[in-house]
Amino acid sequence: MIKIKRPQDLARLRRLALAAQGLLQAQPYGRGLAGARKAINQLGYVQIDTISVVERAHHHVIHSRVPAFKPAMTNQMLLDGDIFEYWAHAAAFLPIADFRFSLPYKHAIKSGQTHWYKTRDKKLMGELLARIRSDGPIRSRDVETNTSKRAGWWDWKPAKKALEQMYMEGDLMVSDREGFQKTYDLTERVLPSQVNLQMPSMEEFAAHIVEQQLRCHGIVSLKGLTYLRRSTDLRKTVKALVNERLAQRTLEQVQVDSGEVFILETGALERRLPRVNSRMLILSPFDNSVIQRERLKTLFQYDYQIECYVPAAKRRYGYFCLPLLYRDEFVGRVDCKAHRKSSHLEIKSLHLEPHSFDEDVVLMAFVEAITIFSLFQKCDSVSLTNANPKRLTQRLQRALKPLG
């Protein structure tokens, strides 16, 4: 096992992680729709989230990696059969090539080994399935029931719950989206003909996870490989496979000062890494690179928490603070809100943490990043309320004035 002691060795680990995530180069996957396809194939999934304070997470993640990406391209990939919608560790868009690896979870739900909803209305499910088979795709809002509308996702109408249950079991797929309005259709009518439908063995599933995670993260922990996957058998099989590959010396381990052990391909530390781009990226709280918070803290010494679920009085940085990545370090966070009616991006607060970079350069990088970000939000003006350190507030307000 390699012990990571020197700062330059930890920096190499960070570079490996960021390069695998497509965050070091300006356009690692190309541009536009073609680049978006390659990005999702590399990342393995893009999380779908409903929060709309700024552009939604599934668009934001791709935008951070693909120049000329437009939000409409996500649904275009869905319509073209390049991606499909299902559950990863959360609702997500996934590469269509990985479809067969969604089958074990679907089977577990359908067979009752695990539950999506505790009770299923099988009669209603059968009626809806027959209607879709005869009449074509259906949107959940097209289904009329006598149930009064109540607030909260736990009070979804019975018909919507039935559609969602059949989607999770695999009988239905999302064939189209209009915002967060899903259109459901029979799986056999949605899937491209070339898709592999063979149920993977546990060993095949474990190999897929190990290879995918090494590809998209560069370095992984044993815990991170099965992040939020609850299958004990899968975890045991993944662990056995990792131990086998360590014994074969196709994988090796490194240990950082905290004691955390990471796994990577043998020789990865010696590879030539992409040069660091002197730019700042404003990332989504649900970005693949930051979603495993413990890993983020261990590798980057960046303690991050999304605070929209924290009571307002206890928030430190804001409702929806976004991580700031400069070169190969996380240097702060920014709390923004896009006011779409007035096309205005409000920066409620910017927090810069101690770093070793030239302050002027970092501030210039932030102004450039927020300019690009505001265009992505379709905002033509920007304002800043507060910055930390406070001495930077007026300076940044002046720098942002041309955007206001």
Image (cartoon, rainbow, N blue to C red):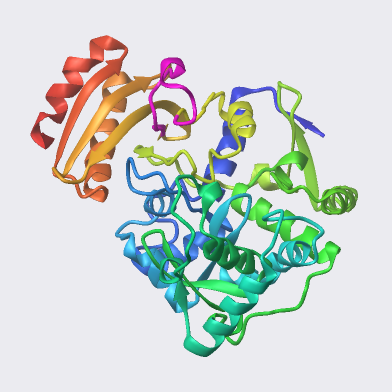
Q: Is residue 168 left or right of residue 337?
A: right
54 drawn magenta:
no
Q: Position of residue 314 (x, y in %)?
A: 46, 16
Instruction: Work out which residue is located at the far top of the displayed protein and give it.
Output: 391
When the figure is inspected, residue 57 is found, relative to residue 192, above or below; the finding is above
Residue positioned 59% across, 84% down in the render? 130
Q: Is residue 317 visible?
A: yes
- Marker count (numbered): 0
Quarter occupied by the C terminus:
top left
Quarter occupied by the N terminus:
top right
Q: Position of residue 254 (x, y in %)?
A: 75, 35
Residue positioned 28% across, 38% down in the render? 369
Q: Position of residue 371 (x, y in %)?
A: 22, 40
- Which is nearer the eye, 247 or 148? 148
Q: Is residue 85 left or right of residue 143?
A: right
Residue positioned 60% across, 23% down in the render? 7
311 drawn magenta:
yes
**Magenta span covers which residues?**
308-324
Q: Position of residue 235 (x, y in %)?
A: 82, 49
- Which is nearer the eye, 313 or 43? 313
Instruction: Work out which residue is located at the far bottom of the displayed protein and give it.
Output: 134
Residue positioned 89% across, 51% down in the render? 240
Q: Is residue 221 visible?
A: no
